[in-house]
Amino acid sequence: MIETCDNLGLLPIQAAISNMLKQVIPVMESEQVELEEALGRVLAEDVVSSINVPPNDNSAMDGYAMRCEDLADTNQLQLAGTALAGAPFKQNVLSGQCIRIMTGAVIPQGADSVVMQENTEAKDDSVIFKQIPRWGNNVRKAGEDIQQGQVVVTKGTKLTPAYLALIASVGMAEISVIRHIKVGLIVTGDELTPPGQPLSDGAIYESNRYALSALLNTLPIVLFDFGIVKDDKTDLKTVFEQAGSHCDLVLSCGGVSVGDADYVKAILDELGTINFWKVAIKPGKPFAFGQLGNAWFCGLPGNPVSSYVTFEQLVTPVLQKLSGQTYLPSPHFIAKAACIIKKRPGRADYQRAIFYRDEHGELWVKPNGKQGSGIMSSIANANCYMVLEQDAGDIQQGETVNIQPF
């Protein structure tokens, strides 16, 4: 790694993530919830099927079920009955017979194939077959999707709508999930004013709490919002003690730099421990990780873009590990730079960008305007990060870069 003034004493981002994941211990407590309430929750134990899915051989088409071998010498069979989904034909299909069958209906005993109705012609009490099927044609076998005793969804999976459908298909109405992670959010700064109130001289409207709480509320957590805390060491210490005693993870935003009124690091030294402080990431270098009372602690920078980026890149892996999920890095893709991209070696740079395909289907990317850590529009109007490696310098037009879509 090239040593520059921009990376001296900074922890590379992958080393920071590995450091945190090695230390964080997942929450083990679980609870039973109904399937309707399980979206976004994390499974506490494997889901094992007690049945085959489908439970019986069934028809993949509306048509006629018969013995395939019966059509070796004739194209006409006697119609013996009907099988509907949920109302099976309960007799055996004998040689020379066929039955009318609907999609999803159980294949009756004796039948082994289905010809769809478009390839047949009904005539009185018989059916003429215009197609000779292969054995097993249009038959969905029992257990074709899921077999009895099979692990359907593994422990640690975050449940999506598709997983809920899969679990429902094996007949389970309740499942065991990890309890909600308790996350405390603290925003610090004398200059911060809640939206809707008049601004005094030197003040700005507080926006980080809205971004971070919205990001957190997409996860299986319970949020404790401690609001805006002024830059008063006594007040901050009181709030930090409360958060550390009630939460699994405490996030603070602001106060982790080196200014005279940046008290967070000093309070952490008193109430907990700091495992590392400062990461080789741009934006977001002053990121702190440690412990606060009973909780893990992540200190985010105060600039809006810096707090947003460090949450997505550094806090999200911690929350995944805490909630029992397996950490899965976000997918990256390769695109070509549509212009020269300025970059100083020393920190991994997450530039906000727009990717697109040209008329030949080739993927291109360009920075989305100014990249300052206070320019939130650079994220709001972008669709990806350009992930520029720590040691990289300027990227020339046409060179390939990694992108991480939002």
Image: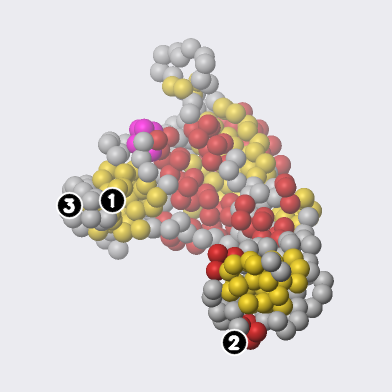
Residue 277 placed where, x, y %? 46, 49
Q: Secondary structure at mark 1?
A: strand
Highlighted range, magenta: 375-379
Residue, disc 2: 72
Locate residue 175, reporting x and y percent.
Answer: 76, 57
Question: Dot 3: within a 10 Å radius of its alpha carbon, few (fewer than 14), some, or many (20 or more) residues?
Answer: few
Q: Nearer the viewer, residue 62 or 303?
A: 62
List the residue tagged with mark 3. 397
For disc 1, the neighbor class at 10 Å (few under 14, some 14 to 19, many from 20) is: few
Q: Is residue 176 magenta?
A: no
Q: Which residue is mark 1?
A: 357
| Position of 168 relative to 116 (above/below) | above
Sequence-first tag of 2 and 1: 2
- Side (left or right) of 122 relative to 336: right
Q: Main secondary structure of the magenta part?
A: helix
Q: Nearer the viewer, mark 2 or mark 3?
A: 2
117 or 178: nearer the eye? 117
Query: Label 2 is placed on what type of residue?
Result: Ala
Question: Looking at the figure, which quarter contains the N terminus?
Answer: bottom left
